[in-house]
Image (cartoon, grey):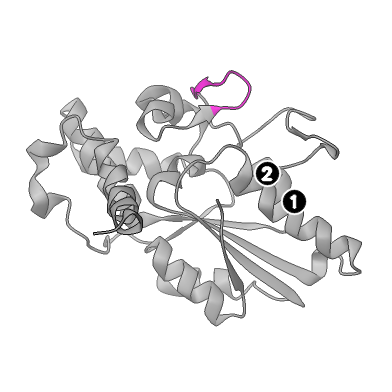
Amino acid sequence: MDSNENKSSSDRRLFLGSLATGAAALGMATLGISIPAEAADQQEVEAWFDKIKGKHKMVFDVTKPHQIFPFAWPRVFLNSNIATGTPEKDCSVVVVLRHEAIGYAFQDSLWEKYKFGEVFKAEDPATKTAALRNPFSNPKDGEYKVPGVGAIAIGIGQLQASGVMFCVCNTAMTKLSAVLGANASVDPAEVKKELMAGVLPGIQVVPSGVWALGRAQERGCAYCFAS
């Protein structure tokens, strides 16, 4: 096995590895791949994807925290199109939060309660330590800056105001609920309800992240791995 194959295998294991405490007690059957029954209504989800319109369309595949980049690239895409003559309203951008990036779909209270900064190895750009909040849910004006560019509006709400669509993987949420529930000796179904209630406004729950990537590309989106 070459180094690339080793890295790929390591990446596939990282999500469960980062949640290892208590996971062994669940067994492989509990953590197996399945499509959760409580996924959003199919017609509702398909209708959400039907909002993808316009001249230029891109879907960003976000699989894990990577500093500001999962949120900076959608803004760069929009700004570049504006600079080349296409306004935001004629662009469609979809951001798929899946695998180890699903934490960004949740409110600050869940980050604090479940220590998502440690769970997902997500650093707060302001403190350079494990985040105790969702760093991109409601940043302060001017909080994020790029050398040579200045302040950039890359909060989730700010991006949504520019038409960016966010969705989160329900399958990963279900697996996360199982592990968190086992660690806290709580019914995973109750944890799942808590996670569902804590999804940020405007973020669509989809059956799985890979399913969402397919639906977005079927509607004309080009694919970009957000790294």
Residue 186 in sight in this render: no
Residue type at mark 1 is Ala
Image check: 4 left or right of 161? left
* Residue 73: image location, x then y, percent: 67, 52
Magenta stretch bounds:
124-132
* Residue 199: image location, x then y, percent: 48, 44
Q: Are marks 2 and 1 in contact (CB under 8 Å)?
A: yes
The stretch drawn in magenta includes residue 101: no
* 60 shown above or below 200: below
Image check: 203 left or right of 30? right
* Residue 112: image location, x then y, percent: 44, 23
Query: Which label sits on residue 161?
Result: 1
Who is closer to the viewer here, 182 or 5?
Answer: 5
* Mark 1: secondary structure: helix
Determine the residue positioned at 54% across, 76% down.
217
Residue type at mark 2 is Gly
Image check: 119 left or right of 138? left
Residue 180 in sight in this render: yes
